[in-house]
């Protein structure tokens, strides 16, 4: 009998894609000003940079989502987790329609082992039902139906809600533990 | 107190977009052969036309999804249902990446009253959790978590599973009844 794997929804921006460092790079390129990650702590990304229009401009610029750097360790860990979890990539992409195709291309390049069947580009995530959800935004995790895992980011650093992880190494350790607990029940 | 509306997932192709008639139109245009809807009954769309490659070619052609005709009555009924339901458009678009932007544009043109927050472009629909789901494919309805409503199409006409509706008028009548039953419980 084939045992159904637990389902795991993984966000893109701020989780497998390093939007924070990309914003810093693009800000430096456009404005000649270097912003430190520490400067971003506790502020919504849209308000964290000196020019409050910058982030909005970047996310609406062709190429922004296509050129995002991959979060360190994400590719290897996601690949490994797929042995034990039914992995879905779930991204709130509908707000930026031009990102739809770029996000698909980005996934094709960096995560070609994820089937098209397991990709979801959506608006709000309230109708997504998975056993686990990894996200960097409270708005997605607060109403999620499974176990919420908060991926650390400067913008979420000062609020304490949900289980927090700081890296893909921590995700791996946490989810392996979850599996052990589950199998010992 | 604000009462939460029941959630309703509505498929695009074959439900709010008339793919069947579009296939017939494009087949006639490309091959000079007119196919009747009756000829399509009980066959998967990909195998229903004389040239078995035609459907695959069409769905991968730029413009196919952008120019789909709207299913009669869909716009008015969806708009009306939004008074009583939290409506989500849920389309298995990831198989055809070039359709992502076209589907978004099509929705913007014909259903501009649907917020980007309520649009989901996905692969399989097994992690979608809504109270109701309207779809023309058994593969989506068989595992859906809420009440399944099968929108009639030639390809699903010979199998009897789930509550079947033949038009948007029938959807309206059925869902109004559901609301009455719910409120009398």
Image (cartoon, coloured by chain):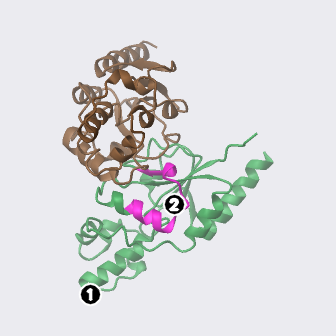
Chain colours: A green, B brown
**Residue at disc 1, secondary structure:** loop
Q: Nearer the viewer, residue A67 or A148?
A: A67
At 41% from the left and 59% from the top, the residue drawn is A104
Taking the view exactly as shown, the residue that stands out farthest to the left is: B109
At 30% from the left and 46% from the top, the residue drawn is B103
Tags 2 and 1 on a common chain: yes
**Residue at disc 2, secondary structure:** loop
As drawn, A63 above or below B37: below
Position of the N terminus of chain B, as image quadrant, is top left
Q: Nearer the viewer, residue B19 or B164?
A: B19
Badge 2 crowding class, 10 Å Cα cut-off, few under 14, some 14 to 19, many 20 or more, is few
What is the x, y in percent for residue B94?
A: 42, 50
**Residue A26 quadrant:** bottom left
Question: What is the number of the mark on residue B104?
Answer: none
Residue B153 in view of the camera: no
At 35% from the left and 19% from the top, the residue drawn is B166
Q: Nearer the viewer, residue A35 or B77?
A: B77
Question: What is the number of the mark on residue A160?
Answer: 2
Q: Which residue is mark 1?
A: A32
Say whether residue A36 is magenta: no
What is the x, y in percent for residue B56?
A: 40, 45
Residue B154 in view of the camera: yes
Using residue B25 as the reference point, say whether residue A126 is left or right of it.
right
Q: Nearer the viewer, residue B151 or B126?
A: B151
What is the x, y in percent for residue B3?
A: 37, 29
Cα gap from disc 2 to disc 1, whole angstroms:
34 Å
Question: Label 1 lies in what chain?
Answer: A
As drawn, B108 above or below B177: below
- The range drawn in magenta is A103-121
């Amino acid at each position: 009998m084939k045992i159904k794997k637990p389902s795991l929804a993984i966000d893109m921006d701020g989780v497998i894609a390093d939007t924070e460092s990309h914003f810093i790079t693009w800000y430096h390129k456009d404005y000649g000003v270097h912003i430190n990650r520490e400067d971003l702590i506790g502020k919504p990304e849209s308000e964290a940079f000196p020019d409050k229009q910058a982030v909005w401009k970047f996310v609406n610029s062709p190429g922004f989502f296509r050129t995002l750097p991959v979060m360190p360790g994400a590719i290897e860990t996601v690949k490994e987790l797929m042995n034990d979890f039914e992995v879905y990539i779930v991204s709130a992409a509908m707000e930026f329609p031009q990102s739809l195709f770029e996000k698909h291309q980005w996934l094709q390049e960096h995560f070609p082992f994820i089937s098209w069947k397991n990709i979801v580009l959506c608006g709000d995530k309230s109708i997504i039902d998975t056993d686990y959800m990894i996200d960097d935004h409270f708005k997605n995790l607060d109403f999620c139906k499974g176990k919420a895992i908060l991926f650390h980011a400067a913008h979420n650093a000062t609020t304490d809600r949900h289980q927090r992880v700081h890296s893909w190494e921590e995700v791996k350790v946490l989810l392996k533990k979850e599996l052990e607990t589950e199998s010992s029940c």
